[in-house]
Image: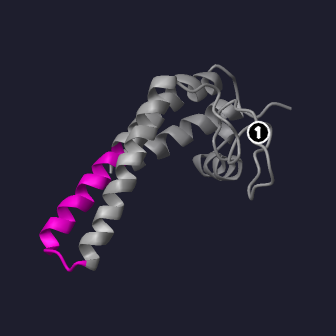
Amino acid sequence: MARSKASTSGTERGARSAMNGAACGCGPGAGPLVGRARDGVGPGAHAVGVDAAIKAANLKHLKRIEGQVCGIAQMIEEDRYCADIIQQAAAVQESLRSVAKNLLRNHLTHCAVAAMSQDGDKRDDMIEELLELVAKVAR
């Protein structure tokens, strides 16, 4: 028996989205995970597709961030000027935002497109997930 869109509240979709995690058509990952991916979606799932250029850029950014964080720790150990440490922390946050935007771009290009081409719960879950992700990235 099909459920009408009117009978599915935003709360139900939010709960289903939280239970299922990502609503992309991804294949499940290997190994036991808490909140294991069901039907190829959610935590533990793999991306439908990964853009090699975005992946390389993200890895490059993350290596740079790793160095920046180590530098901040050293600055704190050396009792450096607070404003200088805050400036470095802000630079790390901006770099992490760049990584998140790249990941969102890949998610929209591959995972979201796959889920949005389907009818029903997967599409609805993806819409909710995207709204939540955009709100988090936009902060």
Which residue in the protein does label 1 denote? 28
Which quadrant does the N terminus fall into? Answer: top right
Question: Residue lying furthest top in this view?
Answer: 117
Kindly identify the residue that appears in the image at 41 percent across and 49 percent down.
136
Asked if residue 73 is positioned above or below residue 63 in the image, the reply reads below
Asked if residue 87 is positioned above or below residue 99 in the image, the reply reads below
Crowdedness of circle 1 by 10 Å Cα count: few (<14), some, many (20+)? some
Kindly identify the residue that appears in the image at 38 percent across and 42 percent down.
61
In the image, the segment drawn in magenta is 78-97
User: Which colour assignment does the render follow?
Assistant: one colour
The quadrant holding residue 122 is: top right
Dominant SS in magenta: helix
Kindly identify the residue that appears in the image at 55 percent across and 42 percent down.
129
Total label count?
A: 1
80 falls in the magenta region: yes
Query: Residue 63's x, y, as percent?
Result: 41, 47
Say whether residue 135 is visible. no
Say whether residue 87 is visible. yes
Query: Residue 128's x, y, as percent?
Result: 55, 41
Left or right of 134? Residue 92 is left
Left or right of 69? Residue 45 is right
Query: Residue 102's x, y, as percent?
Result: 42, 34
> Mark 1 falls on what kind of element?
loop
Q: Name the foreground residue: 54 vs 114.
A: 54
Query: Residue 51's x, y, as percent?
Result: 52, 24
Q: Name the foreground residue: 137 vs 68.
A: 68
83 falls in the magenta region: yes
Asked if residue 58 is positioned above or below residue 85 in the image, the reply reads above
At label 1, the amino acid type is Pro
